[in-house]
Amino acid sequence: MHLFEYNNCNWGNNRTLEHLYEEAFMKIGIIIYSKTGHTKSVADTLEQQLKDRGHDVTLDFIEIAEQEKDVMHPEITKAPDASPYDFLIFGAPVQGFRLCAAMSTYLNLLDDMKGKKFACIVTQALPFKWLGGEQASRKMKSIVTDKGGEFIGHSIINWNKADREGRIDDTIKHILRLIEIEVAVEA
């Protein structure tokens, strides 16, 4: 049988390879907090790349009260619902060498995450991952896995490095690979 004939193969229950391919796409939620727009710019690119691959993608934003006095415990005014998604991507900046308080507070508000697969994207101004990026990623992972989520991977973008665009491209490719692996496993 030639490769082009596989589309007509029967995979049981009258499902062709084409049907399997169509069923393999995921409903993906990208939930971010972005104070300066850096994390948002990465999320926008990722959203488009995932949509181009046929996934059902929603980009949503965590919002906090304006002029929040208690920066360590911000009041969340908009908390996106994480429940409808097969796969979640959480994105946030580093603030004060740790995960920004808005994302930490939001993640702590989430209900049970059992069975939810997720990845994390962290943006930071400082040039080395150990200056907050790794800690921020570990914090997101810890909060969500404690609620039953399944951590798939993470990426950190050092915003002020000369090769920022390359690092953004690498992050997008990395997250896309993680999702492609999950799609293959699910199919």
Image (cartoon, rainbow, N blue to C red):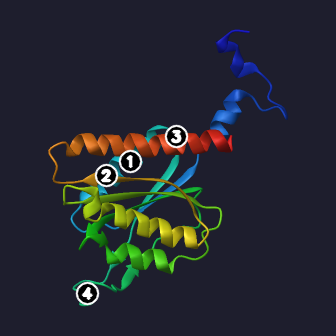
Q: Nearer the viewer, residue 117 or 24?
A: 117
Q: CA distance from mark 3 to mark 4?
A: 39 Å
Label 3, secondary structure: give it: loop
Please give the label number shown on residue 68.
Answer: 4
Label 1, secondary structure: give it: helix
- Residue drawn 58% across the image and 48% down it: 26
Residue type at mark 1: give it.
Leu
Q: Where residue 138 sits in the image (x, y, percent)?
A: 42, 65
Earlier along the polypeptide chain: callout 3 or callout 2? 2
Residue located beneath label 3 in the image? 54
Q: Are marks 3 and 1 in contact (CB under 8 Å)?
A: no
Q: Where residue 103 sits in the image (x, y, percent)?
A: 38, 72
Label 4, secondary structure: give it: loop
Q: CA distance from mark 3 to mark 1?
A: 13 Å
Question: Is residue 36 placed above or below 178 in the rendered structure?
Answer: below
Tell which tag, 3 or 2, sits nearer the viewer.
2
- Residue drawn 77% across the image and 21% down it: 9
Q: Is residue 98 left or right of residue 28?
A: left
Earlier along the polypeptide chain: callout 1 or callout 4? 1
Residue type at mark 3: give it.
Gly
Earlier along the polypeptide chain: callout 3 or callout 1? 1
Q: Are marks 4 and 2 in contact (CB under 8 Å)?
A: no
Residue type at mark 4: give it.
Glu
Number of marks present in the image shown: 4
Q: CA distance from mark 4 to mark 2?
A: 25 Å
- Residue drawn 33% across the image and 84% down it: 74
Q: Are marks 1 and 2 in contact (CB under 8 Å)?
A: yes
Please give the label number shown on residue 42.
Answer: 2
Q: Is residue 184 left or right of residue 104?
A: right
Q: Is residue 81 visible?
A: no
> Which image quadrant is residue 60 in?
bottom left
